[in-house]
Image (cartoon, rainbow, N blue to C red):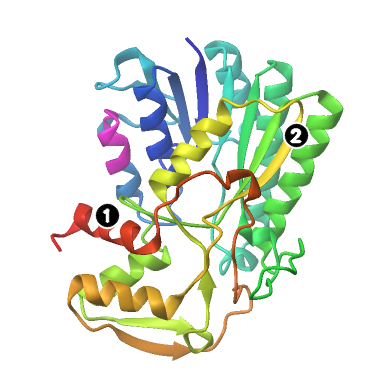
Amino acid sequence: MSTVLVTGGAGFIGYHLTQKLVQNNFNVIIIDNLDDFYDVDLKIKRLSLLGIDGSKFGFEKRLESTIYNNRLIFIKGDICDKNLVDSIFQEDKITYVVHLAAKSGSRNSFQNPQLYVRNNVEGFINILQASVNNKVEHLLFTSSSSVYGNMSLDNTERKIEPISLYGATKRAAEVLAETYSKSEHLSITITRLFSVYGPLGRPDGLIWKCIESIKKEQTIELYNNGNMWRDFIYIDDVVEVLFRKLLTVPEYFEVFDLGTGEAHQITKVVQILEQFLKKKAKTEFVPMHSSELVFSKALNQSLSSFKFHNIKDGLKKLLKEITPI
């Protein structure tokens, strides 16, 4: 039975993908340092749903799932710890790697650039080197749409020119991945994720913040007079594509966008949520942040046959998970 290492497995995408993997008879090792960029209790809740007891956490301690028996192990640890990373690869005979661990957040990245470089670049080098040394079959790395600059509304002009330090670190990691793939003959797939939403999502995510603000009658701050466009993709679609891609090993290197290919104006998303929640949103226009893109949309020709949730169906599905509508 193949073993998959999922870095950042206590995160939003990591939790859902881990569930998919163990339910399809893969062994999974999660490594996550439980970074406090957002509420750690949410990460602990996700792990508890995987059968991992949060009261027993300890650095580098191996915890077995009480739900998936000996097929799921959680290790609280840091990918920047080279010795720990090497020991996991060697001890657990890793077949596949899904690298999700990262220091996130475009707006905060310039405030502590060393931390972003350490986690997103230096930590990734440990994963790359261990993958080469242990001859893993496939490394799937989740990058970000933040590697792009502002796109044209018709999406015909797009350049890789990040405007946040976070995006720059993800781009640096992409370059490292391609170099390792071609020089060390390591099969790597890079997926550039767009705006993912769904149950147990990150509380700093736009859709989650809008839902909570409408329910609590709090003000939603909108940049650029609300003229912001995003490609929102439902978590189930992300997990299904990542799962399929993980098992489709490229000869060496592949990179693709992971989004629906359709952008929605933020104000339109707020209107849909108002209709479902039957409450009027309070909104306030605020100055544009320098690290924010105005328009972002995936070009996913390689996924043209995949049936994505449309935005209304996805939002309705999410709201049914968290509140009756």
From the viewer's perspective, is residue 101 above or below residue 224? above
Which image quarter: residue 135? top right
Give how far across and how far down residue 221 sits, in percent: 41, 82
Residues drawn in magenta: 45-54
Which image quarter: residue 183? top right
Marked residue nearer the N-terminal end (1 or 2) = 2
- Residue 45 horizontal side relative to residue 311, left or right: left
From the viewer's perspective, is residue 281 above or below residue 69? below
Taking depth in this image into account, of 260 and 273 the one nearest to the observer is: 260
Label 2: state its secondary structure.
strand
Residue that appears at 35% across and 69% down? 209
Residue that appears at 73% across and 45% down? 174
Label 2, on which residue?
A: 253
Q: For residue 113: magenta?
A: no
* Label 1 neighbour load within 10 Å: few <14, some 14-19, many 20+: some
Amino acid type shown at disc 1? Lys
Label 1, on which residue?
A: 317
Taking depth in this image into account, of 180 and 145 the one nearest to the observer is: 145
Label 1: state its secondary structure.
helix
- Residue 232 horizontal side relative to residue 256, left or right: left
Residue that appears at 27% across and 83% down? 281
Taking depth in this image into account, of 292 and 75 the one nearest to the observer is: 292
Residue that appears at 32% across and 58% down? 313
Give how far across and how far down residue 25 sits, in percent: 39, 17
Observer able to see residue 58: no
| Residue reaching furthest to the left | 324
Which image quarter: residue 273? bottom left
Give how far across and how far down residue 78 sits, in percent: 54, 36
